Amino acid sequence: ATRAMALRWLCVLLLALPGAAGDCLQPPRFQFAEPVSVPQLSYPVGTMLRYRCRPGYVRNGAETPDITCLENSSWSKKSAFCIGKPCGQPDIKNGNFHTDTDLRFGATVTFTCHPGYQLVGSPFAECTLKNDQVAWNTIPFCQIILCPPPPKIENGQLLGESDAFSFGMSVSYRCNKGLSLIGDDTIYCTVADGSQGVWSSPAPECKEVKCENPQVPNGRRLSGFGSEHTYRDQVTFECNIGYSMKGSRVITCDANSTWTPPVPTCTQILCGRPPQFPFATPMTAVKDKSEFGTEVTYHCNPGYTAAPGKSSVITCQSNETWSAADPDFCVRQQCSAPKVEHGAVVGDVKEFPYETAVNFTCNAPYTLKQNSAKCVVAGDGVDWDPGDFFPSAEVTCPRPPNIANGQHSGRSLEMPTPGVTVTYSCKEGYERLGNASITCTDRGVWSRPLPRCHGVWGGRKGAGCPVGSQLTVERRGWLWSVR
């Protein structure tokens, strides 16, 4: 019971505190505005509270300066209904200002000066409030940079003198007659380290300058034809035909009376020995060194012939190299296709250029005299070596055949060749019938028919018995038989 009573008194106390039972607490604070009335500890739901702009700020268009206490005990949110008063653009002569924001109350800007001027004062300014008005708290100024008086020179005069020399001004110098001005004839007032006025270069010098008259053997001048040359005079050279220049073609008379760069030289253009080709030889004798423009003509070596439309001439060029000849200006001569009777060339070969070797095979029963040949030089052209495989391959016949009761003249023949003739004869008591001889033909066989030997009876052809034969007579009854 005591605990329940304590909770009831705590609730009564909380309800009696400010902001209880759905009230809003104190209103929000704004940098640009403040409440019109004195702020209270709490406000009931539905209360509308009005603000006014702080000094340095003005109303932002139609934005209302009121906020309301909502049922969730919070104040309604508002955008900025007051904005800073504008300061306007700061005025800085011979300079510029820079900022990342607008130019209203509270803004900050940075100042810089144009080239040739230096900033005097703070490089920063802020838009501040003064007597209920806004303005830049400070604005620096840009002061022109001055150079010291230009230096004097000996044996010359200064042109364009003045009481003061500011940035961008210039002065010129001139030397007395007969002297050359070494250096810049005009100098300018410029800036160093952003604030110090200095002259763009040192004062020039007046002195006597004379360069010797330049001569280039095997060359000629294109400019600077006079015999006297002083400071900054230029001479241009070129070499004669057949010579190349070593050095610069343009030289200038320097302040120390010498030519810069040094006077060039012209050296003769010489090419080395002309190139060698496996298929061609120079038509004239060649030297170890050849002059510019020398031409070398090649003629084709035996076994080769000139290719149509291609030049065999090379020339010594200005860079001391030979010009390139047309590639393959000589081509191999061709042998005619070999014809082998009763045989063929090995492989499917269509062309037979110089130095080509071919192999042969023969049809049976033929054999080759040689099994290969090569395309070689022959007179002004090419031909096969050896060439005796034309018109046919070698053919032989077997040993001559023997006949009964006879003999032949070819007993000593091993491998008779076509055209060989063998003669036959018969033994005593026999006579030859048919051809007296046979011949080995191109087909490797003997001609036909062969002769034969026939026995002789009673010394007469076809009558009696052959010489040396025996006669047997038998009687069988009344018949007689002879054998």
Image: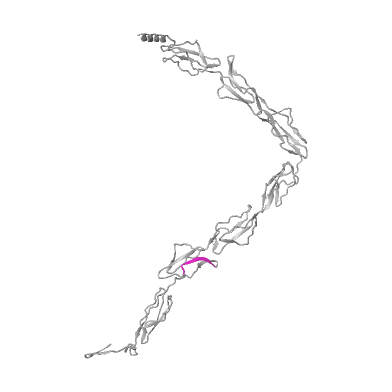
Question: In the figure, residue 47 lies in which quadrant?
Answer: top left
Residue 246, image x and y in percent?
67, 49
Instruction: Tell me if residue 130 comes above or below residue 447 in the rendering.
Output: above
Residue 307, image x and y in percent?
54, 60
150 part of magenta stretch: no
374 part of magenta stretch: yes
Instruction: Tell me if residue 143 comes above or below residue 32 in the rendering.
Output: below
Specify the farthest residue to the bottom: 478
Quadrant where the C terminus lies?
bottom left
Question: In the figure, residue 234 lies in which quadrant?
Answer: top right
Relative side of 341 to 121, left or right: left
In magenta, the rendered stretch is: 370-378
Relative side of 241 to 58, left or right: right
Instruction: Tell me if residue 359 comes above or below residue 208 in the rendering.
Output: below
Q: For the image shown, how many numbered marks are present on the structure?
A: 0
Question: In the figure, residue 133 lies in which quadrant?
Answer: top right
Instruction: Tell me if residue 129 comes above or below residue 302 in the rendering.
Output: above
